[in-house]
Amino acid sequence: MNSHDTHVGGPDLAALAALLADGTRADFCLALLDGRAWTAIELARHAGVAASTATGHLNLLVGGGLLTQERQGRHRYVRLADPDTAELIEKLASMAPRRADPPRSLPAANRSRALARARTCYDHLAGALGVAITEAMTDQGMLDWEHGLTLTGDGTAWLAELGIALPPATRRPPVRSCLDWTERRPHLAGAVGAALCRHAFDAGWITRIGTSRAVALTDAGRRALTDRLGPAVETQTPVT
């Protein structure tokens, strides 16, 4: 058997890598980590490219299975295909080298700092806030990392106190570790991470900053998380 035969029928990893080898397509995927659906025009503005250029890139990403699309009237919306895809993008971002050129304007620098402090990673919390919550839950025995990440009985009880019921069993694991690309430490993902993020929005603990995926911890959120998880999250700056 020659080397060519060993690859017949196997996964085409090179094809997947090629989809993200273009800077514009990579920027689209990073932007879509906010979990929302975007139009081609919105993504074109975000990346600073022509709408026709954006459409060509999006067709490749949809065809390659990284994005899914839906149409409403004349508009086409795209989003990341699923949570597994979001985790892949976040993990690759954590492994990627930092760009050499720093933000050249004050607004760009502020956006970069806001993303590092707290953001959504598809449908769960990331950044310093997401990591702080994960580490506080670990310190209080709600998460166990000894044999792979698991939610403990104390964790289940804590979620119940917040009114968060454990999501029904699906292919998606209840809890999963997601390596944070700014903190280089894990934050909580999986169905429980998504449910906790939704609760944080619904309870007014966090609020979106503009149209980006950066979020700010509110005064109410700071008090609630400090009461429930201790002072570990108190270092996060509340919005006033």
Image (cartoon, helix red, strand yellow):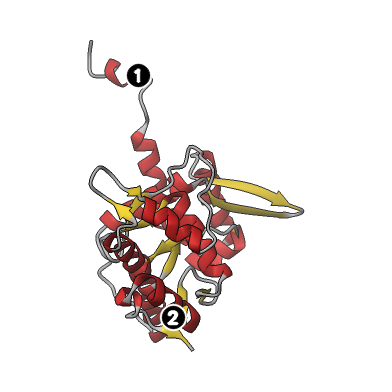
The x and y percentages for residue 32 are 50, 58
Residue plotted at (47% across, 48% down): 83
Q: Residues within 10 Å of mark 1 (few under 14, many from 20)?
A: few
The x and y percentages for residue 96 are 27, 56
Residue 119, placed above or below residue 168: below
Q: Would you say 2 lies left or right of 56 here?
A: left
The x and y percentages for residue 235 are 32, 80
- Residue furthest out toward the bottom: 240
Q: Residues within 10 Å of mark 2 (few under 14, many from 20)?
A: some
Check residue 56 in the rendering and tell me which mark sits there, or answer none.
Answer: none
Residue 115 quadrant: bottom left
Quarter of the image with the N terminus is top left
Query: At numbered mark 1, what does the secondary structure look like: helix, strand or loop?
Result: loop
Q: Are marks 1 and 2 in contact (CB under 8 Å)?
A: no
Specify whether residue 122 is in view.
no
**Counting residues from the N terminus, which is met first, the one under dot 1 or under dot 2?**
1
Check disc 2 and report the residue beneath it: 223
Instruction: Give the distance between the C-alpha atoms of the residues marked 1 and 2, in whole angstroms.
Output: 57 Å
Residue 46, placed above or below residue 149: below
Check disc 1 and report the residue beneath it: 8
Amino acid on which disc 1 is placed: Val
Residue plotted at (35% across, 19% down): 8
The x and y percentages for residue 188 are 37, 56
User: Closest to the observer: 40 or 231?
Assistant: 231
Which of discs 1 and 2 lies nearer the camera? The answer is: 2
Q: Would you say 52 lies left or right of 132 here?
A: right
Q: Would you say 139 lies left or right of 124 here?
A: left
User: Closest to the observer: 193 or 114?
Assistant: 193
Specify whether residue 108 is in view.
yes
Residue 98 quadrant: bottom left
- Residue furthest out toward the top: 1
